[in-house]
Image (cartoon, helix red, strand yellow):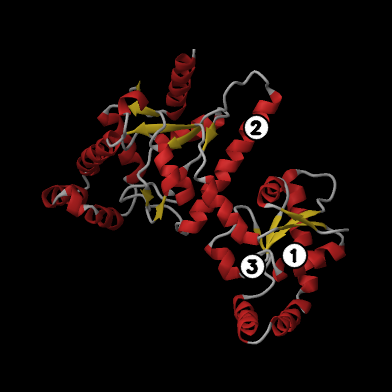
Amino acid sequence: MAITKLNIEEFLTLSLKNPVLDVRSPEEFQHAHIPGAFSIPLFSDAERKVVGTAYKQESKQKAIKLGLDFFGVKMVKMVEEVEELITIRMKNYELQKPANFVLVHCWRGGMRSAGVAWLLDLYGYKVYTLVGGYKAYRKWVLQAFEKDYPIHILGGYTGSGKTEVLNALQKKKQGVIDLEGLANHKGSAFGALGQPAQPSQEMFENLLAGELIKNTAKNQDLSSHDSQLTSPSPIWLEDESQRIGNVNIPTPFFNKMRTKKVFFLNIPFDERLDFIVHNYGSFEKDALVAAIIRIKKRLGGLETKIAVNHLIEDNLRSCFSVLLRYYDKQYQKGLQNRKGLSSLLHKVETDTVTPEINASFLLSLIHDTIN
């Protein structure tokens, strides 16, 4: 068999249905990687440093010899790891025939990916490598945020259950990107409660770009099967601040989000308050107090004291009422800070936070707007 080199677009298209093997070191992979890729490191972190130092301080030939020493003893284990991954993939996708296609990349598309590709090709796999490696992928990621997408923004005050509405829209076969889900953060001072650790900024960008390519591919697939579609299906995103916890929505993409239609769920205060109490009331008091203290400067000393005292007295509803009024003001300020808001804003009047009902309201509104 021959090893095939692919550009980034070809590589990512195949990655949607074939396993991607990232042969960079564990440290490189942990920092950020192509979403869905498997870590099959050619070198450990320590070995990578040794080889890299030899390359810089001595010669390419010396680095290759050291690399071969490290690689040689790992060949059998590496092949077995790939076989196991392929077997798992066959079960997950219910494939009847062995999946003999593998995609391999390293940092620059150099010696590491070439070495692993040679081994797997020798063993009998059809191997594709990425020209330019992960570095080329990162360039593609940043360029992806410069493009325009058919975005619809889901707006609404805190406690409107926007994430749950996005989930309901997804069940109705709508394109959805859950920014807070990608960021592992709900966006407020309380957003980290109950969430896993946030990804690095680079990994967050990779995840977002991956969701954009999936939704774009879905639209292209729909168009190819339905010639009557005159425009791509919208991709729903929640109205967010640029910063979500410790990560930021890339500026070019965020700026485009701010020019899109906002479908605002206008839900009564008490309904939203019930939702907040239900979703956050079970967290430890210490964690809730710490979150309140984080916004003390903006909330104000008196309001902070009132909210904390209500919490200490187990009066959750009164505590969250103070906080909800604060976040309503913050959201309103951010909403108004949009050019041409009057033409972008579409209010959806509803008296419930039930996601299935509100998802149906949104789709009806869009249908009526189009027709």
In this view, the mark in front (3 or 2) = 2
* Residue in front for this viewpoint, 335 or 318: 335
- On screen, 125 above or below 176? below
Nearest to the eye among marks 3 and 1: give it: 3
Mark 1 Cα shell of 10 Å, populated few (<14), some (14-19), many (≥20): few
Q: In this view, does 188 lie to the left or right of 317?
A: right
Q: Name the residue under label 2.
A: 220
Residue type at numbered disc 2: Gln
Q: Position of residue 123 (x, y in %)?
A: 86, 64
> Residue 274 location in percent, x, y?
30, 34
Q: Report helix, strand or loop for mark 2.
A: helix
Q: In this view, does 314 lie to the left or right of 159?
A: left
Res 345 visible: no
Which amino acid type corresponds to the residue marked 1 in the rendered image? Glu
Please identify the residue farthest to the top as the structure is shown: 371
Quadrant holding the N terminus: bottom right
The image shows residue 66, relative to residue 92, as above or below, that is: below
Q: Mark 3 points at which residue?
A: 24
Residue at figure coordinates x 65%, y 28% from the top left:
222
Q: Earlier in the sequence, mark 3 or mark 1?
A: 3
Mark 2: few/some/many CA within 10 Å (<14, 14-19, 20+): some
Residue 8: give its label. Answer: none
Q: Which residue position holds label 1?
A: 81
